[in-house]
Amino acid sequence: MKLYATSIPQTLPSWATVISNNAGLIEVEINDKDPAFHSIIEELSTEIEPVIIGVKAGDLCQRFSIEMIDTNEEL
């Protein structure tokens, strides 16, 4: 899984790796097989819609002080 951010903390969790940092756009790859990542996901899981359980990307980013951008947003 990848996230695109405009800012990240100096120290990222072991399951997150910066892939590139070009023109202020930081690409972060998440190792979603890492047990530490799974425990965070379990902790942040909520009912997003009736009968749908998941984690909002914004909640995950907020937890680790990552400022995410919306790649679907029109410029």
Image: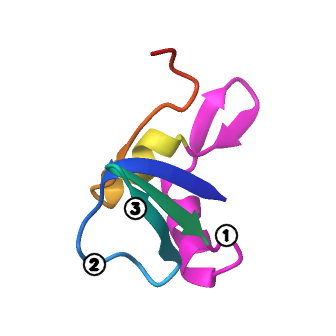
Q: Position of residue 65 (x, y in %)?
A: 27, 56
CB within 8 Å, label 3 to label 1 = no
Q: Amino acid at mark 3?
A: Asn
Residue lying at the far front in this picture: please name it.
23
Decide: few, some or many residues near mark 1? Use Cα within 10 Å; few <14, some 14-19, many ≥20: some
Between label 1 and label 2, give the one nearer the viewer: 2
CB within 8 Å, label 1 to label 2 = no
Q: How many marks?
A: 3
Q: Earlier in the sequence, mark 1 or mark 2?
A: 2
Say which residue appears at 60% left-offset and 57% top-offset: 2
In the rendered image, which quarter contains the N terminus?
A: bottom right
Magenta-colored stretch includes residue 38: yes
Under tag 1, what secondary structure? loop
Q: Is residue 46 left or right of residue 25?
A: right
Mark 3–mark 1 Cα distance, whole angstroms, equals 21 Å
Say which residue appears at 34% left-offset and 49% top-offset: 23
Decide: few, some or many residues near mark 3? Use Cα within 10 Å; few <14, some 14-19, many ≥20: some
Residue receiving disc 1: 32
Residue lying at the far top in this picture: please name it.
74
Residue receiving disc 3: 21
Between label 3 and label 1, give the one nearer the viewer: 3
Decide: few, some or many residues near mark 2? Use Cα within 10 Å; few <14, some 14-19, many ≥20: few
Under tag 3, what secondary structure? strand
Q: Nearer the viewer, residue 74 or 44?
A: 74
Residue lying at the far right in this picture: please name it.
51
The region drawn magenta spans 31-55
